[in-house]
Amino acid sequence: MPAIIKTPAEIDKMRVAGRLAAEVLEMIGPHVQPGVTTDELDALCHDYIVNTQQAIPAPLNYRGFPKSICTSVNQQVCHGIPANKRLKSGDIINIDITVIKDGYHGDTSQMFFVGDVQPHATRLCQLTYQALWQGIRKVRPGATLGDIGHSIQHFVESNHCSVVREYCGHGIGRDFHEEPQVVHYGKPGDGLVLEAGMCFTIEPMVNLGKRHVKLLKDGWTVITKDGRLSAQYEHSILVTEQGYEILTLRRDEQPDGPL
Ligand code: MF3
Ligand code: CO
Ligand code: CO
């Protein structure tokens, strides 16, 4: 199934939704501290999205998801459900924000460090951020989804970590999850050929140990099978004539990623 090519008017709305999603991450960062609960982080984001941004938190009630954001701590890979559980120094946490504004979605996530974090955990997060950008830098008309997946997989595995296979990036627009699926592994030249006007996320999940995952009985939380740490970063991206535009770029980021 092909990806939807967005019109210029739709792209303007995607830019607005993307910026709002990025601004939620900028807002919540200072609140990620030892002692805060993930429920409190969820409530702060919910209030900011609904009241300040006058937007909609897309996860809330999405296929029965009970909260407004996803919070995935340590060995949790993705789709962690905020709870009455306090963060402690040394934890790493992914916060994944999706907002709907004027009918269009913006989807982005980043890792945060809680207090003092061990070097192997900070390294995993840095590696995952670099892996995201290895994929982003392949994006241009004529490149393929396989080019993106291969560059991420090659980079991660060269650094002795593993890429989760069961969850992937996705087209984004009027729907939260549109065609195509954007997997984070593959072969150069395989898969869909990119065209200007496509919008999709890239959101690699990288494990310090083996790639295998399991789903908890809550039906949402994905954890590593071996119990080791996992990290994820996500951007929503527009394919442009020149290459790419990051719709969810934050103030702490460079437009072309880390050096
Ligand atoms: N934001 C996630 C993604 O990147 C999806 C979360 S679905 C939810 O695709 F229901 F868990 F919110
Ligand atoms: Co996504
Ligand atoms: Co997301």
Image (spheres, rainbow, N blue to C red):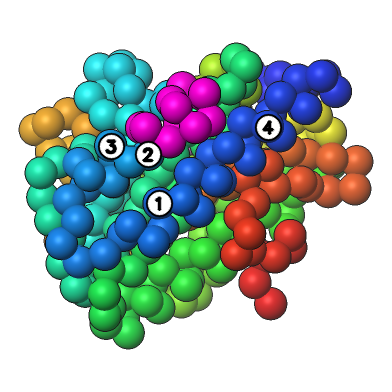
Residue holding disc 1: 28
Q: Can residue 26 be found in the magenta stretch?
A: no
Quadrant of the image occupied by residue 66: top left
- At mark 2, the secondary structure is helix
* Image spot of residue 120 (x, y percent): 31, 81
Give the residue pinned by disc 4. Answer: 16
x 8%, y 33%: residue: 217
The answer to which of marks 3 and 1 sits earlier in the sequence is 1
Q: Residue at x 26, y 64 (%)?
A: 33
Q: CA distance from mark 1 to mark 4?
A: 19 Å
User: Where does the magenta region start and end?
Assistant: 46-56
> What residue is disc 3 on?
43
The residues tagged by marks 2 and 1 sit, at their Cα atoms, a distance apart of 7 Å
Q: Are marks 2 and 1 in contact (CB under 8 Å)?
A: yes
Where's residue 182, x and y in %?
56, 38
Callout 2: 10 Å neighbours few (<14), some, many (20+)? many
- In the image as oriented, which residue stretches furthest toward the bottom? 119
Please provide percent x and percent y for residue 218.
12, 31
Of mark 4 and mark 2, the one earlier in the sequence is 4
Look at the picture and state if 202 lies above or below 75: above
